Image (cartoon, rainbow, N blue to C red):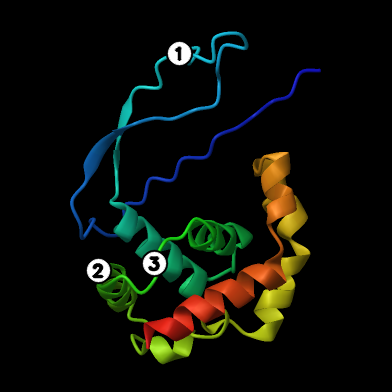
């Protein structure tokens, strides 16, 4: 069966990066079925540092106008993969990004559900299947549960202090 797959690239022009940009190889899963070798060279692309990328995700999760399931999925993904959210550089970048948007920089506000109301969380939960699951691999769909993700995110944010 033919399946159309789309890749979404976001190119933000609102603010300049705060950390060093690095050129990195594009990784993909299009592999030869017998050899396991990549079917094509993915090339390279300029990328934000991992710390800045996570700070951006925290900002988006905390203050994006319309709450997006992908932000909470991405934050939960890095936490499940043992990223330390208490990393001082991430926290510093997160605060700077909040400042850029004239948002509250008191991190205490973001300890529960990144500062989102129960109503916003409920709204986001109602959109997970249509906005998130279509772009996740089947195994990742099984791995993601919003309530579990929120508990993990809240625990990580509590540790920031």
Is the C-beta separation of discs 1 and 3 under 8 Å? no
Residue 137 visible in the picture: yes
Q: In front here: 34 or 40? A: 34
Residue drawn at x 76%, y 54% is 129
Q: CA distance from mark 3 to mark 2?
A: 11 Å
Q: Is residue 126 left or right of residue 120?
A: right
Which of the pair 53/35 is nearer the observer?
35
**Which secondary structure lies at badge 3?**
loop
- Please indicate, yes or no, whether residue 124 appears anywhere in the rendered image: no
Q: At x 54% / y 9%, what residue is drawn? A: 35
Give the residue drawn at x 48%, y 16%.
38
Residue positioned 42% across, 70% down in the render: 59
Residue denoted by label 1: 40
Instruction: Judge the density around disc 2: few (<14), some (14-19), many (≥20) Cα neighbours within 10 Å.
Output: some
| Spot occupied by residue 43 in the image (x, y as percentages of width and height) | 34, 22
Q: CA distance from mark 1 to mark 3?
A: 34 Å
For marks 1 and 3 on the same chain, the one whose residue lies earlier in the sequence: 1
Q: Nearer the viewer, residue 105 or 51?
A: 51
- Within 10 Å of the Cα at label 3, are there few (<14), some (14-19), or many (20+) other Cα atoms? few
Indicate which disc residue 84 carries.
3
- N-terminal of the pair, mark 2 or mark 1, is 1
Residue, disc 2 = 89
Residue 32 vertical placement versus 29 (above, below): above
């Amino acid at each position: 069966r033919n399946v159309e797959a789309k890749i979404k690239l976001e190119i933000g022009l609102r603010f300049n990066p705060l950390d060093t940009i690095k050129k990195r190889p594009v990784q993909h899963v299009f592999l030869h079925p017998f050899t396991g070798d990549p079917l094509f060279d993915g090339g390279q692309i300029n990328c934000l540092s991992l710390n800045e990328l996570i700070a951006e995700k925290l900002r988006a999760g905390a203050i994006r106008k319309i709450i997006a399931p992908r932000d909470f999925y991405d934050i939960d993904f890095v936490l499940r993969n043992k990223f330390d959210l208490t990393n001082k550089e991430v926290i510093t970048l997160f605060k700077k990004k909040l400042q850029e948007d004239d948002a509250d920089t008191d991190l205490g506000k973001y300890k529960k559900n990144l500062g989102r109301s129960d109503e916003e969380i409920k709204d986001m939960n109602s959109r997970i299947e249509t906005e998130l699951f279509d772009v996740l691999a089947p195994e990742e769909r099984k791995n993601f549960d919003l309530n579990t993700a929120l508990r993990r995110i809240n625990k990580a944010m509590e540790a920031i202090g």
